[in-house]
Amino acid sequence: MGKQILTKNLRTELKETVQNEIKQIPELLKELDTKERLNVLCKLLPYVLPRVESVNFSLGEPTDWSL
């Protein structure tokens, strides 16, 4: 078996395993107490929502946006 075929098969197996685990997350979360559930959700947030970056005012930028 070639290296590329092995890699493709491994990726396929890993993808299926991860998809199956993701399907089980709601049931697994129900088994956790509130603190543990919030901790897991906080760790998963970066994979669902983009990180918000702060916006800073720079010298020379307009300060009045009214029309």
Image (cartoon, helix red, strand yellow):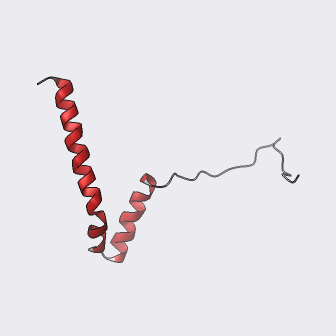
Residue visible at 17% across and 24% down?
Answer: 3
Q: Is residue 18 left or right of residue 40?
A: left
Residue at the limit of the structure toward the left, as seen here: 1
Q: Residue furthest top?
A: 2
Disc count in the image?
0
Q: Is residue 31 left or right of residue 65?
A: left
Vertical placement of residue 61 versus 38, above or below = above
Q: Is residue 47 above or below residue 37?
A: above
Q: Which residue is at 81% across, 43% downward?
A: 61
Tell me what residue is drawn at x 37 percent, y 74 percent: 35
In the picture, residue 66 is in which quadrant?
Answer: bottom right
Dividing the image into 4 quarters, which one contains the N terminus?
A: top left
Residue 43 sits above or below residue 62 on the image: below
- Most distant residue in the bottom direction: 33
Residue 34, horizontal then vertical, whole percent: 36, 76
- Judge left or right: residue 48 versus residue 13: right
Where is residue 47 shown, x and y percent of the image?
42, 52
Q: Position of residue 36 (x, y in %)?
A: 33, 71
Write down the quadrant of residue 60 in the picture.
top right
Q: Nearer the viewer, residue 67 or 65?
A: 67
Measured from the top left, where is residue 52 in percent x and y? Answer: 57, 53
Name the residue rendered at 39%, 64% in the picture. 41
